[in-house]
Image (tube, rainbow, N blue to C red):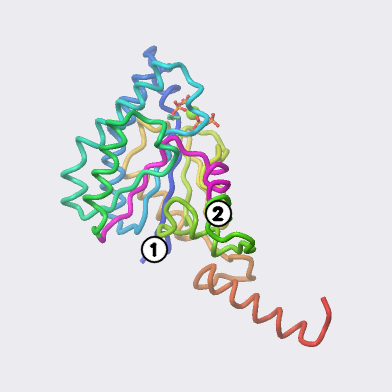
Amino acid sequence: MSNIKHVAIIMDGNGRWATKRYRPRVWGHIRGSAVVSDIVQAADDLGLRALTLYAFSTENWSRPIEEVSTLFRLLKKFLLKEKMRLLANNVQFKVIGEIQNLAPETIALIKELEDETRSNTGLKLTFAFSYGSRSEITRAVNLFQEQNPGKMMNETDLDRYMYRPETGDVDLMIRTGGEQRISNFLLWQLAYAELYFTPTKWPDFTPLEFKKIIENVSYRERRFGNVNSQTGLEDSLMKAESNKSTLFKGVNV
Ligand code: IPE
Ligand code: IPE
Ligand code: MG
């Protein structure tokens, strides 16, 4: 069984895909949105625990208004179109990001789908929409301070105050479209993720390539700071703690 349980994807390259075909950028988004359902299905088939998709960043608000409104329209369409399938497949759906800025109708659709899938036990599907990782982190810190005045925050606290703590750390982050950057996506959760950058633009991304990437990455040795692979990050951290206390017993450091 693969050790890859939580995959996050930056679905990039729609605009360039369309421009190369002498079509408007929004055409790329329309074609790209059709790919999303196939990849969600593939994630389910592969037995992933969580799939987090970056659909719209806080920085993407600065794009031309027609492009932004097309992206909103496509989100709404996805919510309506996929509802039955998500329910039938036992998927637990959630949107993370500053959704208060979206149209009330879209917010209502999101809430409805989140509520209806809340008790599902299958794939945890997350849409990062109007999402920025720095904003997620500062929001978490502010919320923590508000609820725990005067208390120091530790790593577990910060984990717990993220938008969707139950999805946990990312095992593999894939970015399509050829760029090799993170673009303000899950900075905290990616700390020990494997990174995979493919030149394939999102509208051309297929379940087959997705499966191959996961297979390929499963062979990588994830050491989590240790000299050889461990069961996981938790294990490695525990070993580090125990080594620290053994080594520095009685010594001032
Ligand atoms: C990704 O495709 C989708 C969003 C950012 C919303 P882009 O629109 O960024 O496509 P490129 O990178 O310009 O090709
Ligand atoms: C990142 O892509 C955001 C999404 C895919 C939703 P961008 O195209 O916005 O990122 P940059 O501008 O290349 O960093
Ligand atoms: Mg882009």
Please state, as top left, top right, bottom left or bottom right, where the N terminus lies in the image: bottom left
Q: Nearer the viewer, residue 107 or 236?
A: 107
- Is residue 137 found inside the magenta-colored segment of the image? yes
Give the x, y percent position of residue 163: 44, 50
The amino acid sitting under disc 2 is Glu
Q: Which residue does the image show at 43% across and 39% down from the upper left? A: 54
> Which is closer to the viewer, label 2 or label 1?
2
Residue 183, compared with residue 211, is above or below; it is: above
Q: Which residue is mark 1?
A: 2
Residue 126 circle label: none
Q: Quadrant of residue 36?
A: top left
The amino acid sitting under disc 1 is Ser
Q: Which residue is mark 2?
A: 146
- Determine whether the residue tagged by mark 2 lies in a helix, strand or loop: helix
Q: Is residue 173 left or right of residue 1?
A: right
Is the CB of mark 1 within 8 Å of ligand 2? Answer: no
Q: How busy is the neighbourhood of tag 1: few (under 14 within 10 Å), some, or many (20 plus)?
A: few
Q: Nearer the viewer, residue 146 or 82?
A: 146
Give the magenta range.
121-140
- Is residue 57 found inside the magenta-colored segment of the image? no
